[in-house]
Amino acid sequence: MSQPHRALHLVARPEGELRDDVLELRTGALHDLADGQLRVATRYVSIDPAMRIWMTEQKSYWPPVELGAVMRAQAIGEVVESRNAKFPVGAWVSGMLGVQDGLVSDGKGLKAFDPKALPDPAWALSAFGATGLTAYFGLTDIGKIQSGETVVVSAAAGAVGSSAVQIAKYLGCRVVGIAGGPDKCAFVKDTLGADAVIDYKLGDVGKALTAACPDGIDVYFDNVGGEILDAVLKRLRMHARIVLCGGISQYGAGKDARGPANYLSLISARGRMEGFVIIDYMDRVDEALAALGKMAMAGKLTSKIDVIEGLENYPEALRRVLSGKNFGKQLLKV
Ligand SMILES: NC(=O)c1ccc[n+]([C@@H]2O[C@H](COP(=O)([O-])OP(=O)(O)OC[C@H]3O[C@@H](n4cnc5c(N)ncnc54)[C@H](OP(=O)(O)O)[C@@H]3O)[C@@H](O)[C@H]2O)c1
């Protein structure tokens, strides 16, 4: 018997502030299962800043979402009907499920996980999902952090940033977090354990960085780009590494996106600035999960989740992340 289905389709390319009407909620039905297929009921959709880029025709590591297609999203869900022995009813899976309440799949691209091994199934999209893996490989593989180094993390109260602060601390670094507002700054220092924190909304980030990092910066884990990246570039130590994880301050800027003015400092510092995308690390997931699991067992890894509910609230969920209203990993509960 076919099942009712709701999905959010991209129907226009956004310009400037993300408006509700670039997406359309369409209802329909999922077809009956053929042999080898399963039906997944979506539980949580991951809200990622890069979605703002995927909606446009901007070049990125994934092609633009086509107009009329279901909006691309990573999500987790439960198998509620199955004719595929690998994914029995009751199994939890993660994958690019899209912004929809369910789907029929042949299992390709889905990964089963045990929700009981996590404090909450939603952690499969935060500390133990692409978010935590991004922080881990960004710091260890691109940043090559060493114990005793000074590591600065921007958007430090956010999903990737909060994992990055905790991992860098765990690996013996001195960590300075940058975040917006007193509540987020208190969280970065008191809960995540950063050695110092800078509220960039209070003004002169450069001056605050000089005070927090008097001997300069060894590694900068950049989530935001823009003026903060420029302020960091002026304060690099010899052989500094800048991990280009994201540049959220520029995601809505389109062709007006600005690059760093102070990049020449990399020459005298013999520094390196390198981008990376987490999808390139999928063959090393087990290595990261083992390290993150060890941290969690030692009580050194927490994950703050920020949930809003209802497919129709997806545009608002994404606006929250782009404007900094989210506090922790933003998820949409379906
Ligand atoms: N390379 C990869 O493979 C990869 C994978 C995942 C994510 N990312 C990137 O990682 C970054 C963080 O993503 P996330 O999912 O963890 O989101 P998040 O940090 O949970 O949320 C985004 C945060 O960015 C901050 N922000 C927004 N506009 C800003 C601005 N103009 N200047 C400074 N800060 C601003 C806000 O925090 P405040 O309130 O503190 O301003 C907001 O809460 C993004 O750039 C994302 O694209 C990269």
Image: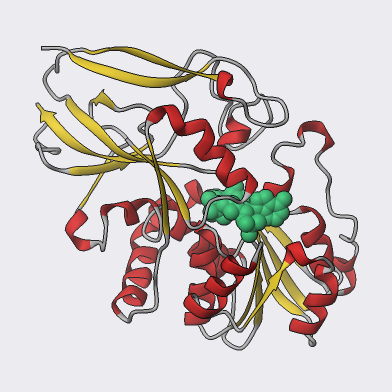
State the scheme by which the image is colored: secondary structure
Which quadrant of the figure has residue 76? top left
Q: Is residue 110 shown left or right of residue 11?
A: left
Residue at horizontal 39 percent and vertical 65 percent from the top? 288
Q: Is residue 159 shown left or right of residue 174?
A: left
Depth check: 16 or 153 in front? Answer: 16
Task: Measuring from the top left, give residue 292's x and y in whole percent.
Answer: 37, 69
Which quadrant of the figure has residue 44? top left
Residue at horizontal 25 percent and vertical 26 percent from the top? 105
Total number of numbered discs in the rendering:
0
Depth check: 103 or 36 in front? Answer: 103
* Above or below, comparing residue 36 to residue 175 in the picture: above
Is residue 98 visible in the rendered structure shown here?
Answer: no
Is residue 80 visible in the rendered structure shown here?
Answer: yes
Q: Considering the image in quadrants, where does the N terminus appear?
A: top left
Name of the residue lying farthest toward the front: 182
Depth check: 308 or 211 in front? Answer: 308
* Above or below, comparing residue 210 to residue 245 in the picture: below
* Above or below, comparing residue 51 to residue 180 in the picture: above
Which quadrant of the figure has residue 56? top right
Q: Is residue 131 shown left or right of residue 16?
A: left
Task: Measuring from the top left, give residue 299's x and y in whole percent.
Answer: 34, 79
Q: Considering the image in quadrants, where does the C terminus appear?
A: top left
Task: Measuring from the top left, give residue 2's x and y in whole percent.
Answer: 16, 12
Task: Measuring from the top left, give residue 54's x and y in whole percent.
Answer: 58, 31
Residue at horizontal 48 percent and vertical 46 percent from the top? 279
